[in-house]
Each structure stands twice: as C-alpha cells, then as structure tokens.
Image: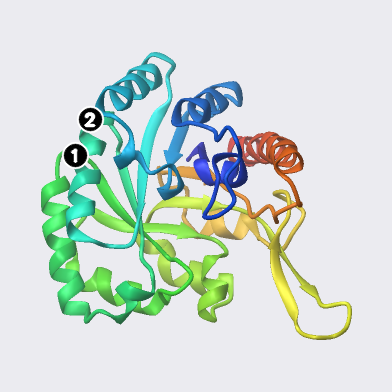
Amino acid sequence: MTPGLGSYAFRWSIGHRDRVPSRPMTAMDVLDAAVGLKMPVLQYADNMRLHEIEIAKIDEIATSARERGVALEIGAQGFERDMVSRYVALADQMDASILRIALDGEDAARPLEDLGEDLRGAVAEARGICRIAIENHFDYPSPQMARLLDRVEDDGLGVCLDVANSICAGEWPAETVGLLAPRTINLHMKDYVIAPDPYGVGFRVHGVPLGEGRTDMAAVLDALEGRAMSVIYEHWLPWPGDFSAAHEQERVWTAQGTAALSDILAAR
C-alpha cells in the first residue's frame, strides 16, 4: 500500500463553492505540496477541476510530476458520460492510473441497469489507460454500489473506499468497509468525531487530525488484506472563520496526517 495526498486536504486553500481565497492554490501548488510532504502519489479530486485547465498547463503538471517521482490520480464528481470521457482523456495525458468518480444523489436515482450500461462503456474507453474507482459518497448507499459493481463485473472498475462518507447515507463505517473492501482499489483515509450538541440538540460529525478520532485505521487496512493500492490522505477540517486560519490549519493537519499515514503503512 502506498501513501498519497488528496487535493481535498486543501479544500479551503483551493476554494470551495462560495468560499474562495484571493489567491487559490493551483494544481502545481498542490503538486509542490505533495513533493514537500514526500508523498509518492497525488490524487487531484473534483475540487481541482482539471477539465478547466489549459492543455499546455496539464502537460506541464504531468511532466513535473514524472520528473519529481509523483504518480498522479484524478477525479470527477457525478457520472455524466461526456465528462467522464473528458477525464479518461486527461488520465491518458497525465499518466493517471486511477480515475475516481464520486457518485451522488442523481446517480442514486438512476436505474441500476442504465448506470451500469454507461459504466461499462466508460470502463471500455478507459481500458489500457486507467482503472475507474467509484467512491461511496454521501448520497449513494454502499449496498446499491455493490449491486452496481456486481452488474458491471469488470476488473477495470472498483471502489474508491472512503472511511467516513457513508455515515451520511445511514451506514456505520464498519458496515461500509465490510461491504466494499473486497471491491476496493483505492482508499481515502480521514478521521472524524461525533460530537454531541452542548444543548442536547442532536450531534454533528466533523473532522479531526488523523489518529485523534473514531476511524479504526488498523481495522480498515486489515479488511483490505494488504492489497496494492494508494491510500489517499484527506481531512474534514471545519471552516475556522477566515482564510488565513484555514490555510495554516490545513498545512498543520496535512503535515501531521501524511506523516502519520506513512508511519502506519510502513509499520505493516
């Protein structure tokens, strides 16, 4: 298993939705960060929007990654056939071995046979370029994802297993891991806590530095049985109130988290 860095480790420094800093991190900045953290893998997720970057700049990023010994992976949000085709082409251009696709609520509403047919076409298009890893995202239940994978049945398709996302879908992480681990080809590792509201009005789930929360990292890795794959570090740093604080806390959390992840994998 190989440790890696995900671009969502810099959610606030890159910018997300209506919260965009005056100087957002670029794809090259994120690559520089991966090199500085000695991460051999970098996964650009959908927050990087690679399809909006000029082709020449994509070539520059890919060349720099090759020269600096960083393997690239890329990702998109939602299964829209034309967009997936664009990302397969980007994977080819960037020598990316994994195309991670986060399925969302609209995908969950589609009949399995329709989505499965589209996935078969995408996997065929990607063959010889990259493998497609569909992520258990907030609004796509893991049992439905397992049925989808059974319907497609192709070695070019697997799971990008996120250890915490499916809490939103009403699943405990151990349930999600147990169901999806046999199909997993890419792993997202993060940590979280479930904190009671101080006034007793329910609770909330939020991120904490790796190793300080509920994620049972040893159990997750045991379930994957040491199979070769990248283990991508992400985190759910809550918005701290301003971009200066966000940038500093992302820097600290990411340095600590990637170091902890590397140590955990090296010890196995």
Q: Residue at x 73, y 49 (%)?
A: 209
Q: Residues within 10 Å of mark 1 (few under 14, many from 20)?
A: some
Residue 167, relative to residue 244: is it above or below?
A: below
Q: Quadrant of the C terminus?
A: top right
Display colour scheme: rainbow
Mark 1 vs 2: CB contact within 8 A: yes
Q: Residue furthest top?
A: 67
Image position, residue 110 (x, y; %) = 25, 79
Location of residue 194 (image quadrant): bottom right
Give the answer, above or below, for where 151 lies relative to 231. below
Distance from Cα at disc 1 to Cα at disc 2: 6 Å
Task: Kindly identify the residue that appears in the image at 72 percent across and 73 percent down.
Answer: 204
Is 3 or 13 nearer to us in this picture? Answer: 13
Front-most of residues 74 and 23? 23
Mark 2: which secondary structure? helix
Would you say 91 lies left or right of 205 here? left
**Residue 107 relative to residue 14: left or right:** left
Q: Which mark is residue 93?
A: 2
Residue at 36% across, 42% down: 74
Residue 126: x %, y % from top left: 17, 46
Is 23 rendered above or below residue 198?
above
User: Residue at label 1?
Assistant: 89
